[in-house]
Image: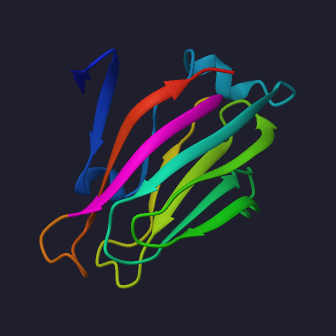
Amino acid sequence: MRRVGRGIERVFGRGAAAGTAAILIAGAGAAGLGGCQATYSADVRNQTPQPLFAKILWRTDDGRNPIQAQRRLGPGDRGTIGPIQAPVGRAILTLDTLPNPQGVWSIDLRPGTTVFNVTQKGDLTAGPLEVREVSFLPP
């Protein structure tokens, strides 16, 4: 993490793509509160030279993870995915491009709206995604 202007910027590279990069939400006990609902959304800026596919999934105990919202963003596009209602600690943002050598990138969302900038490293059309969280607005 590093401070950028008035906010904090988190940079997620290859390590986050290997699985779900978890951000703890108000302590470990918050994820166990299945009855509490929260609103989640993501504001995504596609700074890659190809289409980006963004989805918010609802993580379930049985692994089905149904899609709650999705959007295709062209090169240079910016768009909001959501808002959705989901139990606290159960919303996942996934990002993917084709081709993408690292596979689908994912992260647990915090309740509220999170803004991400998405770029590609190395070979601009086949390099791995680099995702930066640039701001967060709580509900």
Q: Residue furthest right?
A: 35
Q: Residue furthest bottom?
A: 99
Q: Point out residue 28 in the picture as x, y percentages from the top left corner.
A: 56, 20
Q: Point out residue 65 in the picture as x, y percentages from the top left corner.
A: 71, 59
In the image, residue 132 above or below residue 76: above
Q: Point out residue 138 in the picture as x, y percentages from the top left corner.
A: 61, 20
Is the stretch drawn in magenta largely helix, strand or loop? strand
> Which of these two is toward me, 28 or 6?
6
Residue 115 is inside the magenta segment: yes
Q: Is residue 15 left or right of residue 112?
A: left
Which residue occupies 58% across, 44% down? 42
Q: Is residue 24 visible?
A: no
Q: Is residue 97 visible?
A: yes
Q: Residue furthest left?
A: 122
Q: Start and end of the magenta stretch?
A: 111-120
> Which of these two is toward me, 37 or 74?
74
In the image, residue 38 above or below residue 19: above
In the image, residue 117 above or below residue 123: above
Q: Quadrant of the C terminus?
A: top right
